[in-house]
Amino acid sequence: MVTMDERKWKILRVIIKTYLETGEPVGSRTISKAADLNVSSATIRNEMSDLEEMGYIVQPHTSAGRIPTDRGYRLYVDQLVEEKTHSVMSMNSMIISRTNRMENVLKQVVRMLAANTNYTTMISGPAYKQNKIRFIQLSKLGDRQLVAVIVIEGNVVRNHIIDLTQPIDDEHVLKLNLLLNTNLNGLSLREINLDIIAGMKEEAGEHSAIISEVIDAVAEAIRAEKDEETQVYTSGADNIFKYPELADSGKASRLIQTLEAKDTLAEFLRQAESEERDANGIQVYIGEESPMEAMQDCSVVTATYDLGGGMEGTIGIIGPKRMDYEKVMANLKTLKTSLSDMFGTGEDRIVDSEDSGSEE
């Protein structure tokens, strides 16, 4: 990072963030309102002139505000990555501690739920579910290559190299950056529909292939975050044998084998998260409605708990079709609220519990 004083850096950040949000050149009046500078508009204009001479911003036409250059975007992204690295290093021990306590609490939750309901229970650890695009920056690596820097929610940064069939000049790179950020910032993968993509490709013209490759890179980056291993904890497998309709050796064996296949359970719970739910956020699968063959002699009730900021997990209860649905739903509703209260409002709300036994 090129050294600059704090005031210039604040002004540059405001220009980049405002431009990403509006797609319009940013003037001194906007900066004076957005930045905590306590200086006159004339001073801000002088600082903007310095930033322009340094190559970080440019005035697209006379009497307009400024927009970021590739160099300005690069400085912003590098600083973002640096800040994230420092944050990760300083919080590493706290995160490990929080994760360990989270694991202990989730294990206790499924044990308590199995004891209260006399059914089999499962719960997935929380994962980020609503990844949205924060920032995309294209920069030239040479005449025949671009690098796409993709920043998604959670301060996840991915780099993707794009090979070009023909050279591209700086002006067109700048226009593509504007096009990408104006249309995609703040959107999740599911919100990027065919109409948006078609409109961007039409506007990009001869460079439409670059838009396609960036979209593919965004999808890959978001899916990579979602595909990280999901932890699933289970309890109460022996409760199956309390119900004659499930205690048949073949049915019970298949169900227990499924409960031991944590990858399969994780996939089931991820699928359950996307299903339509009732007003309390609860989904009920009865018999053959279940997407898992081994559970089609059962009923499965699931609920998604939300820790805020897009962090979600799923609780599930497996029992006979004649299960006490009212009791099960009441338990799930209470647990959803308890987990959100415990983990969703800051580290000081996390209980420091000890694991009181092995996972069943």
Image (cartoon, rainbow, N blue to C red):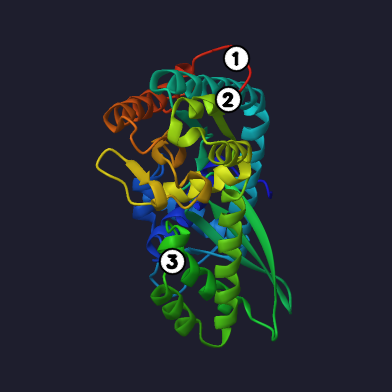
Residue at 44% x, 36% y: name it: 245
Circles 1 and 2 in contact, beta carbons < 8 Å: yes
Evaluate whether residue 8 shows in this view.
no
User: Label 2 is placed on what type of residue?
Assistant: Glu
Checking the image for residue 103, the label placed there is 2
Name the N-terminal-most of marks 3 and 2. Answer: 2
User: Label 1 is placed on what type of residue?
Assistant: Asp
**Secondary structure found at label 3:** loop
Disc 3 versus disc 2: nearer the observer: 2
**Secondary structure found at label 2:** helix
Q: How far apart are marks 1 and 2 (CA)?
A: 9 Å
Between 337 and 311, the residue placed more toward the observer is 337
**Residue at the far left in the pictured view:** 279
Q: Where is residue 250 in the image (x, y as percent from the top left)?
A: 58, 41
Evaluate whether residue 303 shows in this view.
yes
Q: Position of residue 30 (x, y in %)?
A: 35, 54
- Callout 2: 10 Å neighbours few (<14), some, many (20+)? some
- Callout 1: 10 Å neighbours few (<14), some, many (20+)? some
User: Label 3 is placed on what type of residue?
Assistant: Ile
Residue at 44% x, 51% y: name it: 44
Look at mark 3 in the image and give the residue it sits on: 192
Look at mark 1 in the image and give the residue it sits on: 355
